[in-house]
Image (cartoon, rainbow, N blue to C red):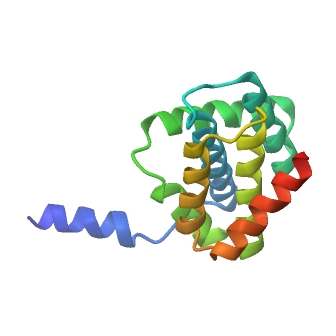
Amino acid sequence: MLDKLKAFFDKHLKVNDESPEETEHAIRVAAAVLMIEVMKMDFEIKDEEQEQILSLLKEEFELTDEDANDLYEVATDKALFATDFHEFTRLLNDHYSIEQKIRLIRLLWKVALADGKVHAYEEHLIRRVSDLLHLRHSEYIQAKLSEVHEME
């Protein structure tokens, strides 16, 4: 019984002893996982969406092609075994400003729009992520509209 209690406190109340580089890598993986999850929501993985994610990772995090590909691979593996989005959104909530969260929602919209159409499940997921990031509905709508209008 005491072992279970200790494990709970170690897991949930442990002081973060990661280096800034490890934290930054974890944040990048979290953002990439969310992009990959949006891509998978319409039950098709299209080349346009994969290319869009790689392009966004390079641009957003100032990565080389090789580093973006490595990040994509790590995030794909993480997404495969993820049971929910809380571990990723919690990390982003801890380290992202409101502006960075809105920027991430815009990136998710770019992924959803990469194939020229938005599936209802993609839209639902982006809305859910927005809620998990504690964004106001107006911030979610603003991010959506700015990306939809950019595509027109």
**Which quarter of the figure has residue 104?**
bottom right
Where 23 sits versus 16, above or below? above
Where 80 sits versus 32, above or below? above
Looking at this view, is 38 or 144 the one in front?
Answer: 144
Specify whether residue 55 is in view.
yes
Give the farthest residue toward the top: 47
**83 left or right of 103?**
left
**126 left or right of 1?**
right
Where 96 sits versus 19, above or below? below
What residue do we see at 29% from left, 70% from top? 9
The percent position of residue 41, horizontal first and vertical second, equals: 55, 38
Specify whether residue 103 is in view.
no
**148 left or right of 20?**
right
**119 left or right of 12?**
right
Looking at this view, is 27 or 80 the one in front?
Answer: 80
What residue do we see at 80% from left, 35% from top? 52
What residue do we see at 60% from left, 48% from top? 34
The percent position of residue 30, horizontal first and vertical second, equals: 60, 51
The percent position of residue 98, horizontal first and vertical second, equals: 71, 75
Number of disc labels: 0
Where 143 sits versus 34, above or below? below
Looking at this view, is 43 or 100 the one in front?
Answer: 43
The percent position of residue 76, horizontal first and vertical second, equals: 58, 33
**Which quarter of the figure has residue 10?**
bottom left
Quadrant in the picture for the N terminus: bottom left
